[in-house]
Image (spheres, rainbow, N blue to C red):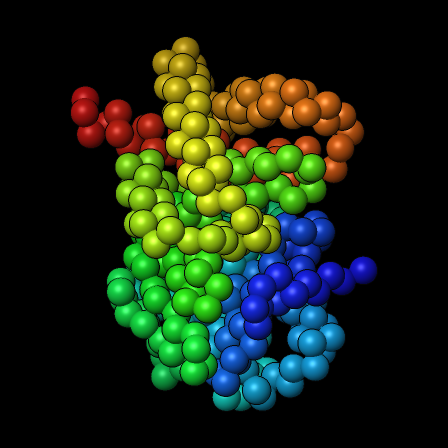
Amino acid sequence: MLETLRIGEDLSLVDLYDLTLEKRTGSYILHEQELTIIETSATPSIPYLIEGLNDLNIELKSIKNIIVTHIHLDHAGGAGSFLEKCPNARVIVHPKGARHLSNPERLIQGAKAVYGSKFDQLFDPIVPIPEDRLLVMNDGDTLPIGPNRTLTFLDTPGHAKHHFSIHDSKTNGVFVGDTVGVYYPQLDFELYLPSTSPNQFDPEAMLDSAEKIFSYHPTAIYFGHYGKSNNPLEVSRQLKHWLTVFLDKTETIVDRSEEDSFDEQCDLLADELLLLVQTKLDEHDVPEDHVVYNYISVDLKVCAMGLIDYYTKTANKTS
């Protein structure tokens, strides 16, 4: 059953069932004079978004702004398809992402390299967005969308170079996309893991971006995956902790598997990372058949690819 939640002042969250998983990726709806949506997920999620808007009694012609935190397909792949149904809207994007939304061929090829034969099922079609319906926001740019609400755009690389986060003046929350990780609301305790997907993962940039986000002293963090955290200090602590753990384990795996292929190293690392996270889950008596393992396993496979890619690039630079 579709879930549409009111999670803040004039703020709703619609479950988009990314990868067909409940509470995997969501769209944030800001109920203001300029009705604004943050994140669309991939094209197969658009029917869920439209259903959620119907539940909120929102007409598609009322939508003014469609914001994507970055252009990875699980956040922006459906933006073109959705825009076609929203005659008065524009898509707001990071300056390094705009050209890829107007011509998504490189996005498509990159996703096919990661997801292979599952690409069509997960992402197709990806509709180009006309350049005259794209609006670029640079670091520090602001967008008033209501009499008491201004959005401030923050350049926040680390997960991707084409990533911004958005501070919301009304709720003093920040929409962070994937910059400070992934939140697992399926659990009855807080777990936040870094999102280190290929091919632009940069741990130093990620920590710098986190520092920029938390310098606003937000009272809420709105994750792309998935939902609202009321504990920004714990988000910050876990990001630093798990990022260190992930990087240390990557170095160990690569050093002892130098003769293995990239895919073999990634598989090995994903298994090792899962064991580390499982230790934390065991501390909280989470059974091995808990649904959260489906989510974490998917995430760690992609994280492993980004970690191995980063480590290989770094090693090549220093050799």
In the rendering, at what x and y percent does residue 264 appear?
Answer: 50, 23
Looking at the image, residue 315 lies above or below residue 33: above
Q: Residue at x 69, y 76 (%)?
A: 56
Looking at the image, residue 304 lies above or below residue 133: above
Q: Residue at x 55, y 48 (%)?
A: 229
**Left or right, residue 61 beside residue 76:** right
- Numbered marks: total: 0
**Is 262 in front, or is 227?**
227
Residue at the farthest left position: 318
Residue 9 visible in rendering: yes
Q: Residue at x 40, y 62 (%)?
A: 167
Q: Residue at x 54, y 72 (%)?
A: 30
Looking at the image, residue 252 lies above or below residue 52: above
In the rendering, at what x and y percent does residue 94 appear?
Answer: 34, 64
In the rendering, at what x and y percent does residue 211 appear?
Answer: 31, 44
Looking at the image, residue 107 lies above or below residue 259: below
In the rendering, at what x and y percent does residue 146 appear?
Answer: 45, 81
Residue 81 visible in rendering: no
**Left or right, residue 76 beside residue 20:** left
**Is 284 in front, or is 58?**
284
Residue at the farthest right position: 1
**Is 103 in front, or is 286?**
286
**Left or right, residue 39 beside residue 99:** right
Q: Quadrant of the C terminus?
A: top left
Q: Quadrant of the N terminus?
A: bottom right
**Is 118 in front, or is 183?**
183
